[in-house]
Amino acid sequence: MSNLILEIKPFKKRHQIKEKKEDLKIKPNFKFYNLFLVFSIIISLFFWSISLAPAQTEEKPDNKTTSTENSSEEKQVPLNPFEEYRQSLETQLQEVLKQIDEYKNQLDKISKEKNTLQKQIQYYDTLIKKINLEIKAIELEIKELDKKIDETQKGIKETKERINRNKEKLKEALREIYKNQKKSLIDILVESKQLSDFFNKIVTLDKIQISIQESIDALKVIQKDLMEKEAQLEDEQAQKIALLNSQEIRRQELNETLKEKKNLLAKTKGIEANYQKLLKESEKTAAQIRTKIYQLAGGVGDITFETALKYAELASQVTGVRAALILAVLDYESKIGKNVGTCNYKKAMNPKEWPIFESLVSELGLDPDQMPVSCKQWYGWGGAMGPAQFLPSTWVKYKKRISDITGHNPPSPWNIIDSFVAAALYLADAGATAGTRYAEWKAAMIYFAGSNWNRPAYRFYGDDVMRIADSYQKDIDTLKSSKENALRQIKSKEL
């Protein structure tokens, strides 16, 4: 998983609310309860009309009036400020996304045209515009999310106030019950000036007990609502952290692109001949491809591309995921990991992950304090491990499957082959084995953003990974072609 992107699981899955199983009920606690039942039946035969008279004198609402009022209210529903604000941001976002798609199409077109200095500068200029718009799109999503967070916090506050009000009502009812529970039926009868007063008191006490049970039931519902809102708030805050992370990644990409353009102009001095000479010099032979350095995140060091390809092809054989895609994802994760560095888990990782991390590392016979994880940023947690940049809670879900393939028991997030297999398994689960460009793009998106993969602000990740995968596929094809040529030459000599 990306070292910075928190694995944002679907809301219903991540925050299942476990209700308490106790069925709270208030049972009558009067000493005279049985006697009351017998006595009330006898007396009710003579004074039925009297006992019910007060209860039937309650005013009933005028249905017609209520209906008219409700109809009036429905017609005068004020516009929701939040919804109005959200729609405004959504309109802006759609316009920005439309422009991003236009630039993406331009980049694809330029890439297919003849490689000239003018086209390369045009490519950089278009890419810079696209990245700037991607940063703007993320800003718009953050604004919308900030508003959602405000609304959720407001809802939590209101729910807590409702809970307090219900608790006060419950206290009042319990005090009334406590005051009357020691009285006998005779005491209540003696205190009553009329028989109707006696029955009214009995009915009132019964209503109080019903009210207590209703208050308890209401509290259960409101408490559940509060827990759901708090879980929703946590999820929204995690999404904000992920968006801030994405924004930071794009800013770094923008700086790198600007630097590349500046270096190109400095080397060529704006002369086409110089650019073509530079292109010729940059053409890679099979030998150069094999020995070029493939960087890995997680503090495990670098390996040659030939070695990386060997691991990727092994992972590809057992999972069905294209080797170039595996290499591209781990390459991109390495770039992100390099930018955030490595830190001690207690300084970088969300405390919820600590027990899992400690158990995982102890099982490997390692010291948790000595094992590097991605550093914490100002906007959220770090804690991703090894080249695949998995969080501990994600790694343990894949541990057995990784072990079944590599034979390492337990597998290690810092072991290169284990990491390649882990990444491939995750991509396979995300649908990369379908083999289509969209399926691979989507799988890369899920690798980065989990259940929020289709959020517009994260599209850059899938686009960049596919661009890197295309480059690696060319290198793989060059190596394959070189190998085939070598075999043909050997056979030719044998003949």
Image: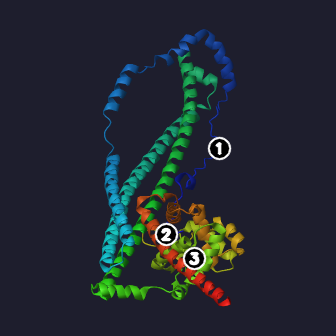
Q: Quadrant of the N terminus?
A: bottom right
Residue placed under numbered mark 1 in the picture: 22
Query: Which of the 4 image quadrants contains residue 476?
Result: bottom right
Residue 471 left/right relative to 479: left
Cβ–Cβ under 8 Å for marks 1 and 2:
no
The amino acid type of the residue labelled 2 equals: Trp
Nearer-the-camera pick, 474 or 3 = 474
Q: Is residue 222 above or below residue 173?
A: below
Disc 3 is placed on an element classified as loop
Q: Is residue 120 visible?
A: yes
Nearer-the-camera pick, 281 or 371 = 281
Nearer-the-camera pick, 81 or 157 = 81
Disc 2 is placed on an element classified as loop
- Give coordinates of residue 301: x percent, y percent: 56, 85
Residue 210 left/right relative to 338: right
Binning the other alpha carbons within 10 Å of mark 1 as few (below 14), some (14 to 19) or many (20 upward) gives few
Cβ–Cβ under 8 Å for marks 3 and 2:
no
Q: Which of marks 2 and 1 precedes in the sequence?
A: 1
- Give coordinates of residue 303: x percent, y percent: 56, 85
Q: CA distance from mark 1 to mark 2?
A: 37 Å
Residue placed under numbered mark 2 in the picture: 381
Q: Determine the residue located farthest toward the bottom in the rendered image.
A: 493
Residue 458 left/right relative to 292: left
Q: Is residue 167 above or below residue 433?
A: above
Q: Quadrant of the C terminus?
A: bottom right
Q: How is the image coloured?
A: rainbow
- Of tags 3 and 2, which is closer to the observer? 3
Residue 183 left/right relative to 467: right
Q: Which of marks 1 and 3 precedes in the sequence?
A: 1
Disc 1 is placed on an element classified as loop
Q: Is residue 495 above or below residue 311?
A: below
